[in-house]
Image (tube, rainbow, N blue to C red):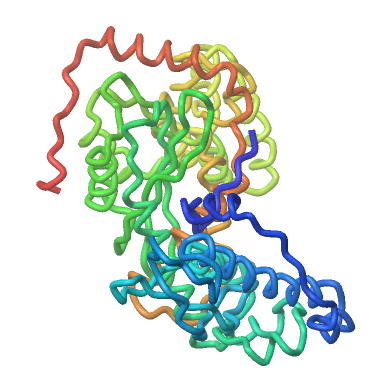
Amino acid sequence: MNKKVPVVSVARTPEADQLANLPLEASFALAEVADAMREGLLAFASATGLVVMRQMMETELAERIGPKHAKIAEGRTGHWHGTTKGPVVLGGRLVTVERPRARTTRGEEITLDSWKVFSSADLLNALVVERMLAGVATRRHQDVAEPVGTEIDKRSRSTSKSAVSRRFVAATEKALADLMARNLAGLDVAVLMIDGLEVAGQCCVVALVITAEGLKVPVGLWLGDTENKTVVTSLLADLVSRGLGFEQGILCVIDGAKALAAGIKKVFGESARLQRCTIHKRRNLSDHLPKDLARTIDARLRVIFAQPDPTKGLEAAKRLAAELEADHPDAAASLREGLEEMFTARRIGVTVSLAKNLTNTNCIESMISVARRTTGRVTRWKDGSMKKRWIAAGMLEAERSFRRIKGYTAMPKFVEALRREIASSAVTPVNYDHQAA
């Protein structure tokens, strides 16, 4: 399943739905858009759209208070009241147009649904974020604007560097707030992945969950100086306060950092099962060995971690550590550290295809790579809030291309086995107080 989730959501409004019911038969003279026609189809379509929009507003007013200049003896609810100017959104710009005005018989301004829809800044904010995340500098937005015609360009604004920057800040603030306020109570979470990325000297710990249906969902981030236990605990406690269910069992996949493991144990207690990333273990071991030997050992370790039988895999890994002990004791120690947690998902029971996602941190690292790419374009950081906004925008940008994990059809069986193991342990989950964090 490929679901597109915009970084800045554009909500479907009742006003837009109402416009479909307008009895409008738009008509206009080609002379009105002749100049735009010579500048190309997009310019012609844009000019035509503005003409039709004006007619929609006039039709809406006529429906609500009667046709202009009509003599209504009884039941009049309002009067036409001339025109005024205001901005509507057209692509990556605001265009000043003239719109009709009306007032009720009590003198109150009548708000038009059509105007509210076309002047909404949501679409403009979304486009600004899309371009910024794609690497378009604030000063270049005007250069990449759509060719909507000379006449419309003369009436355009909100394309300056400062205007684009303000809209991006506002849009990413909302994206961060939405991400940090996501209600997790409705998610049947089976797997939690946690990892960190460094941005301008600060570490941001981010979290991604995988549901029992195999869907990947970014759920939060926490900024700190390092990837320490306090930061991890605060992040996890926040997830719990937003409804993350873990009491029946949750598999936590981490890169092996001790701070991550300590934070998970403090918040989730025995309801969590730790799976360390096998790819990180292979990389760490290779760093302790000469290059020629590292290639050979890595090939053996890859086969060991791919062993469907966790008992045989663990025994083979221990034998490999024993072989390395004499000449490469530090490598042997690195391999033994957390070794049993390399086989947690295998022990619980995963298919070969499902193991490709649940025995390593590739899912969250893929998301982090998008966030790292977007933040890498920033040359000057203002503060921590700016860092969080950009990271959140990158996480949500990555979510747009998320698909179900490979082997997701086997997830229900895996979740059942995990919950059965947790239930059999008969340990009371930790009741962690978020406020105490």
Q: Position of residue 136 (x, y in %)?
A: 64, 76
Furthest residue toward bottom: 154
Residue at 62%, 23% (x, y): give it. 407
Q: Is residue 307 above or below residue 187?
A: above
Residue at 52%, 78% (x, y): give it. 100
Q: Position of residue 338 (x, y in %)?
A: 39, 32
Is residue 390 something one can see in this rendering?
A: no
Q: Position of residue 271 (x, y in %)?
A: 27, 23
Is residue 257 something one can see in this rendering?
A: yes
Name the foreground residue: 203 vs 404.
404
Furthest residue toward front: 73
Residue at 44%, 22% (x, y): give it. 344
Q: Position of residue 310 (x, y in %)?
A: 51, 15
Residue at 32%, 55% (x, y): give it. 222
Name the foreground residue: 76 vs 372.
76
Q: Is residue 356 above or below residue 242?
A: above
